[in-house]
Amino acid sequence: MATATLDIPLGASLTEEQARAIYAQGEEAIVFALLTMAQMLARQQAQAAATSHQAPCTPSGMKPPYQKPTASARGKKKPGRKNGHPGSRREKPERIDRHVAHRAKVCPDCGGPVKRCAETRTRYIEDIPDNLQSEVTEHTIHRDWCPNCKKKVEPAVTEAMPNATLGNRTLVLSAWLHYGLGTTLAQLVDVFNFHLALKLTPGGLIQMWHRLARIVVLWHEEIQRQALESAVLHGDETGWRVNGKTHWLWCFATEDVSFFMIDRSRGSPALLKMFTQEFDGTLVTDFWAAYNALACAARQKCLAHLLRDLEHVEKYKSPGPEWQVFAKKLRRLIMDAIRLRRRRAQHSPDAYASRRRRITKRLQALIDTPWADTQAKRLIKRFRRHQDELFTFLEQPDVPFDNNLAERSIRPAVILRKNSNGNRSHQGADTQAILMSVFFTLKKRGHNPVAVIRDALTEYLETGQLPPLPEKIAANR
């Protein structure tokens, strides 16, 4: 009787009619079918384990390329601009250093003679000169007697810091390459020693960077003050290593400011070092509980994190049937709120306020529903705590519904972490936070960080005062 089941295909394609046919054949047929399907399931699990060596939460960068889906499966967009958009090309150089004329002696195709014509075309090529070498300047410093001070005095040398043998251009450029672009210390030494013929040592560079950080720390404090005075501030944090121990890199950002801070704590003690007083603006963050200890005028929790949480549950937590109902209502609520914000100009003030109240009622109804699913209960608990912080963006036009600004601002630091693996001392961590804050803030404001800091160093060495932190360059300039 058991052999009769061999005529019925077992697996995901088994229909109700075929299952009843197996049941009609008796107990032995049912046992045989169950054992066969159990073997099929075991083979599938073994095959899946053999082709995947990472946990479900493994970052994409740690997965081998052969385990990632193809570009067509990911739905990757076609690179480049869309048809009809203007092209982009390198601008014509403003300065011409030398002119070279080219004329063919014979035809390059057949080798025959050519007839001279008056037609020409122009091509511009920019390149680095072959004789790159450092410039050595001998400074003769006159020391004169001051009758008033009763001592010998001498003028300040503004091309380098006191007792330094390397100039400010080398100092700032090396700091930008390391803290701004993520070039490792060993790579920097190789570039300067072999390509630029300027002998440097790792220890000398680090000491120079520490001295630079002690000078521009006033700008770091000014960046912190401007961040705390902003109307909307975004916050995020990521792991960092200092002397082999786990620390946290905090980033607080606006459109014009990037403030970094490295601290041992990921909780409220670190945040209280940043927020020395009540924040009068709107703080946009994820749902990390440490942010709840801050006193803020308003908050906006990142809805993109919430949507990703839904996807994570559906992909890895195997939720029950009730979860699908809960997730569908929550997704629809979030998307309706985002759509309402985007179409705000299309509604009258009264109509918009009415739709805004409807969003609040739908959220309250979702919270009041007695959900039995474990994951739904977890999110409902979160909504009760942050009920007034989910849709602040509907009331304040300058507040976004996500925390993408902070994530984009902290991303360069994450790339730096991949190369440097953190810092080896607390002094190095302080220098890292100060110089990253200054470099990325200047870049956000449209300035050349190397040129601005170099000029600021010159003024500081001449007057003893650091110039004000440059403002953002106007877009039409």
Image: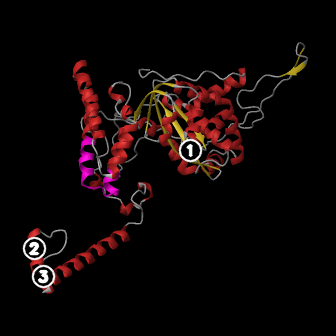
Pick the residue in front: 349 or 110. Answer: 349
Residue at the top extreme of this rendering = 148
Residue designated by label 1: 248
Camera-nearest label, 2 or 1? 2
Judge from the rendering whether residue 250 lies leftward or rightward of residue 20; answer left or right: right
Residue 352 percent coordinates (x, y): 24, 23
Gap between marks 3 and 2 measured at Cα: 10 Å
- The mark that comes first in sequence, 3 or 2, is 2
Q: Residues within 10 Å of mark 1 (few under 14, many from 20)?
A: some
Q: Which mark is residue 290?
A: none
| Rendering quarter of residue 270 | top right
222 to 88, vertically: above or below: above
Pick the quarter of the image with the N terminus.
bottom left
Q: Which residue is mark 3?
A: 26
Query: Looking at the image, is 126 positioned above or below residue 17?
Result: above
What residue range appears in magenta?
311-331
Q: In the image, what residue type sits under mark 2?
A: Arg
Q: Nearer the viewer, residue 118 or 338?
A: 338
Ranked by sequence position, the earlier of labels 2 and 1 is 2
Residue 420 pos. (x, y %): 58, 50
Position of residue 143 measured from the top left corner of the image (x, y, whole percent): 86, 23
Measure the alpha-carbon separation of dots 3 and 1. Answer: 64 Å
Q: Is residue 64 within the magenta segment?
A: no
Q: Is residue 313 above or below residue 439?
A: below
- Residue 20 is marked as 2
